[in-house]
Image (cartoon, grey):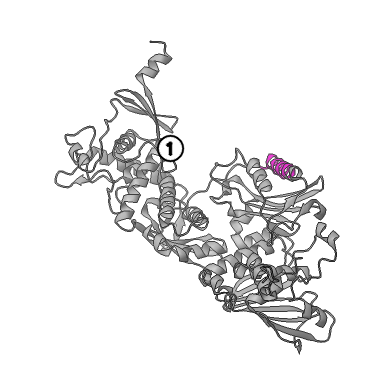
Amino acid sequence: MPCIHVLPDLLVNKIAAGEVIERPASVIKELVENSLDAGARNIEIAIEHGGQKLIRVTDDGEGMDREDLALCIHPHATSKIQSDDDLTSIRTMGFRGEALASIASIAQMRIVSRRRGADEAYEIRAAGDRIEPLSAAAGPPGTTIEVRELFFNVPARQKFLRTAQTEMGHISEQIARVALVHPEVEFRVTHNGRVVHHLRSTNQMRARIADFFGRELAENLLSLSRTERGVTISGLVGLPAYSRSSQKWQYLFLNGRYIRDRFISHAVREAYRGLLDPNRFPVIFLALTIDPHAVDVNVHPTKIEVRWRDSNIIYSQVLSCLRDRFLNADLTASLKMGSAVTVSTNGEDTESETAAENRRQEIRQSIADFFKRATPVVGPGPVYDARQSFDGVSRTPPSGGLSQRSFSPTFTPDRSTGAFATEQTLSAYGMKAEEPPAGQTIQIHNTYLVAETGEGVVIIDQHALHERILFEQLSEQFSRGPLEAQRILIPETVDVSPDQITVIEEHDETLKRLGFELSPYGPGTLAIHAAPTLLKDERMNDFTRDMLDRLADQSNPASTEQIINDLLSMMACKAAVKAGDRLTDEEITALMAKRHLVERSSNCPHGRPTSLRLSLDDLEKQFKRV
């Protein structure tokens, strides 16, 4: 009996579906691309239960006649490729002729189409290996494709689908990838009967960006346009001040199709070098147009990867285009002042321009008053009143209705004496109390602390050290229960991308334990009702946007521990004193004392060193004393 045999058509189509249909968003991609190739200018997308129950795409394109409709669901049937030569000059979105046949093999499909100028429409139905005969139908010019019960005959694939809201997030992202580069096409998207997006036709990509990601981002993008050496580059790129913590905000398009490409990504990274922190990513919406003969788009079934005939030209043109644009632009970051809201006598909310500076002065005075009241006890090095909150170092006042706390993982307050525990208590926790600096600590350049030790000199990065201290304390409190939170009188709002909305659902409990209370506030908008007390002086919309970026970019969502560590690190970094902050003597003393009472004080949560030691031997060698 022969071992080699020809596979049945249905199995062939299922294999093809496995390559191009990963989830409902993949179906949306294939159907919308067909609509664009048909010349549609209005596309309506109706979705039920995240696309698992229904996906309906209706367009006003050129439509199909009876003969075309009968052939369109057969494998490798296409109107876009006629010969081998056509593969080297592809100008359409789709061309493989596998999409409709693949979808029909794993779902229940119904197609109604009417060619422009024709008197009647026709309908065809298919499901698995069953195709029903064509029949006359009613319908306007264009095509409507319904896909129901996706993966109904492939349960192994169906069980890997996520919640309806999560799948809807992937669908919204897929629609963004198409709609951003085709602003002339009007899109209307509904989910379970509710309008999710209504994108009106426009001639500007900036308007589409505002629809998806908010007006603030759209208004802070630099436009660019250039044609050189056969490469046309257009689009919008973000100012350095509007960078993000994830690379997902980089949208690249080639001849009207969304792609990913390492050469372009590297060129973008190099163009921003020196303008951004190495851990930040610029926001870009970059569209390239080149001769189809100069690129192979037939590398991957989803057509998301390409192969260049000359990648060096692409790299150099993108790099030089961005650099030239930056040279002719004012990249100075605008100062973002957090609005201090107060209640006036007539009950209206007012904003004070000097509130931030007044607040800083109040904090300094509160810290100074506290240290005047501090009760010292006998012990190894400086000790302080147990009533002291670490807020004193993080520059939040120890008064004003906020509960006081002291929750370092390496020491406990002695309530009977009102002082921190001595060296014996530290030993009980397995910690070693390092000898505090022998001499006075001074601050230089408002960034580094220099202190004399018994062995020489130690130089400390004030931000990195404070970040580590806050991280350890936050971690300890989080292990015991939710972080202390404070409700926001007037909830702040932030514009978010579609897939960021789904992050809230997936990580709702973790976010609540961290002190965040977030909820949708209309399409593409999020309301912040409560936030950790530690961050009360931060711009919460900026922090929340970065936090959701980090959550959406997690490569392993099941790793809750890693997610928590990342978010606690972000919180500690935001709340810590910054390079350039002038510290009072009392603040320096408090910060140096905490240094000896936390684990891993030699490095910040991100791995950067907090201190450098310079021994007397090293000093004597440098001054030629030995």
From where the camera sits, is residue 186 visible?
Answer: no
Decide if residue 105 is on the left or right side of residue 370.
Answer: right
Q: Nearer the viewer, residue 428 or 324?
A: 428
**Residue 388, image x, y percentages:** 26, 44
Q: Nearer the viewer, residue 292 or 452?
A: 292
Decide if residue 615 is on the left or right side of residue 136.
Answer: left
Q: Pick out the residue farthest to the top.
A: 625
What is the chief secondary structure element of the magenta stretch? Answer: helix
Q: Pick out the residue farthest to the front.
A: 1
**Residue 300, image x, y percentages:** 69, 58
Based on the picture, tell me whether residue 322 belongs to the magenta stretch: yes
Within 10 Å of disc 1 (Cα), the crowding (few <14, some 14-19, many 20+) is: some
Q: Is residue 625 above or below residue 1?
A: above
Q: Pick out the residue farthest to the left.
A: 416
Q: Considering the image in quadrants, where does the N terminus appear?
A: bottom right
The magenta span reads: 315-329
Q: Is residue 97 above or below residue 66?
A: above
Q: Amino acid at mark 1?
A: Asp
**Residue 600, image x, y percentages:** 35, 39
From where the camera sits, is residue 156 visible?
Answer: yes
Q: Nearer the viewer, residue 440 or 602?
A: 602
Residue 75 placement: quadrant: bottom right
Reading the image, the residue beneath label 1 is 581
Decide if residue 408 is on the left or right side of residue 625.
Answer: left
Q: Is residue 412 above or below residue 100?
A: above
Residue 601 placement: quadrant: top left
Q: Is residue 330 above or below residue 542?
A: above
Residue 349 placement: quadrant: bottom left
**Residue 552, image x, y percentages:** 52, 58
Q: Nearer the viewer, residue 200 or 586?
A: 200
- Mark 1 lies on a secondary structure that is loop
User: Measuring 65% from the left and 68% from the top, which residue is drawn there?
Assistant: 15
